[in-house]
Image (spheres, rainbow, N blue to C red):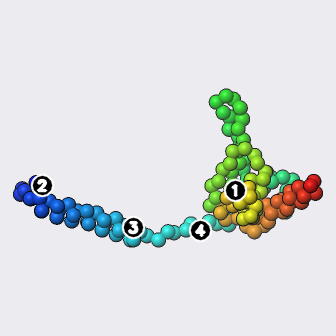
């Protein structure tokens, strides 16, 4: 028996009441799933400063920030962060290959190096600067072979 307020409900009534509650829960879940508001994408302002046309290293690029953290044992742990508006990726260690793959957004090279391409709002000049560094690195690697 199920107590419904002041009156008691028999087995058939309890089964019916539980079925109604179950259907109501499914309806609410279904309604919430399909009445969600559409996703709104953020629009980011273009980066303020244009990238210089020639840099000595990928670590001099304006969209890369090198961070240093002192560990409990007193060692310095280096990492880097992508500063493109909308991209919040950080990596531990200073790996030039990963930085070039991320910044150049070259899908084949990113897949080869297991790195996700940058999704931030960067100017074509900034992306091309990463691409030129990548081409230089690949040409040096091919010349050594």
Task: Measure how far apart labels 4 and 1 are at the Cα level.
Answer: 24 Å
Q: Give the mark toward the camera: 3 or 2.
A: 2
Pointers 3 and 2 in contact (CB under 8 A)? Answer: no
Q: Residue at x 26, y 66 (%)?
A: 23
Where's residue 9, x and y in %?
9, 59
Tell me the residue that label 3 is attached to.
33
Where's residue 44, x and y in %?
62, 65
- Residue 43's label in the rendered image is 4
Q: Which corner quadrant of the image does residue 52 belong to?
A: bottom right
Pointers 4 and 3 in contact (CB under 8 A)? Answer: no
- Residue 2's label in the rendered image is 2
Q: Earlier in the sequence, mark 4 or mark 2?
A: 2
How many numbered callouts? Answer: 4
Mark 2: which secondary structure?
strand
Q: Give the mark toward the camera: 4 or 1.
A: 1
Q: Earlier in the sequence, mark 1 or mark 2?
A: 2
Task: Measure how far apart labels 1 and 2 are at the Cα level.
Answer: 58 Å
Mark 4: which secondary structure?
loop
Pointers 3 and 1 in contact (CB under 8 A)? Answer: no
Sort mark 3 into few (<14), some (14-19) or many (20+) by Cα contacts within 10 Å: few
Tell me the residue that label 1 is attached to.
115
Q: Quadrant of the N terminus?
A: bottom left
Q: Is residue 124 above or below residue 75?
A: below
Task: Measure how far apart labels 3 and 1 are at the Cα level.
Answer: 33 Å
Q: Is residue 82 above or below residue 72?
A: below
Q: Earlier in the sequence, mark 3 or mark 2?
A: 2
Sort mark 2 into few (<14), some (14-19) or many (20+) by Cα contacts within 10 Å: some
Q: Earlier in the sequence, mark 4 or mark 1?
A: 4
Instruction: Pick the residue in front: 114 or 78.
Output: 114
């Amino acid at each position: 028996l199920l107590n419904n307020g002041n009156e008691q409900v028999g087995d058939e009534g309890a089964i019916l009441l539980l079925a109604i509650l179950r259907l109501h829960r499914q309806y609410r879940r279904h309604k919430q799933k399909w009445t969600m508001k559409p996703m709104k994408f953020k629009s980011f302002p273009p980066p303020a400063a244009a990238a210089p046309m020639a840099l000595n290293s990928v670590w001099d690029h304006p969209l890369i920030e090198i961070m240093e953290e002192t560990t409990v044992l007193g060692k310095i742990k280096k990492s880097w962060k992508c500063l493109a508006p909308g991209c919040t990726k950080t990596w531990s260690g200073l790996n030039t290959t990963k930085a070039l793959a991320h910044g150049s957004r070259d899908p084949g090279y990113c897949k080869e190096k297991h790195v996700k391409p940058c999704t931030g709002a960067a100017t074509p000049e900034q992306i091309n600067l990463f691409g030129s560094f990548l081409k230089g690195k690949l040409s040096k690697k091919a010349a050594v072979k």
